[in-house]
Image (cartoon, rainbow, N blue to C red):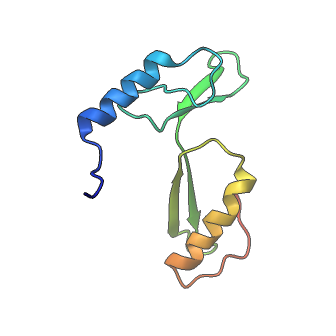
Amino acid sequence: MPATAPSTEQKNIALYQRALNQKRNDKNKLYSLHEPHIYCISKDKEPKPYVFVVKISTTKTKNSNIIVNALAFDNNEHDSKRLVRILEQVKNLSALTPGYCVM
């Protein structure tokens, strides 16, 4: 018998359990039930020391400023680690070969 995908109710219950069971110092906390992919970034600024976001990247051409790529990232890794994935997707989606990148 093939395995079936979890129902929406099962996914919601798993999210509720994750939210209820998380502790203050846990990694990968759940900050939003309706957008579970959001994470917290420390800004080290006085009025708003933290922001809750999803990081994205857009890539545009040098001369015409046309956006040729957009990616959203599920985790909070350093920008330098994302660059390879960004450049690979630009190559796969367009006939362009990236020369340099400004982030």
- Residue at 72%, 76% (x, y): give it: 99
Q: Quadrant of residue 82?
A: bottom right
Instruction: Report the front residue among 97 and 4.
Output: 4
Residue 46 is drawn in which quadrant? top right
Q: Is residue 5 left or right of residue 47?
A: left
Q: Is residue 80 left or right of residue 38?
A: right
Of 87 and 65, the residue lying toward us: 87
Looking at the image, which residue sits at the far front?
Answer: 1
Q: Quadrant of the N terminus?
A: bottom left
Residue 15 x %, y % = 39, 29
Q: Residue at x 49, y 17 (%)?
A: 21
The spot of residue 90 in percent (x, y) is 57, 73
Is residue 3 left or right of 25 when viewed as pictured? Answer: left
Q: Which residue ends up furthest to the bottom in the rendered image?
A: 95
Residue 62 visible in the picture? yes
Q: Position of residue 103 (x, y in %)?
A: 69, 55
Which residue is at 52% across, 66% downward? 69
Q: Is residue 15 above or below residue 7?
A: above
Q: Quick check: can you spot residue 103? A: no
Residue 85 occupies which quadrant of the picture?
bottom right
Q: Position of residue 41 (x, y in %)?
A: 63, 31
Residue pictured at 51% horizontal, 70% vertical: 66
Q: Is residue 40 left or right of residue 3?
A: right
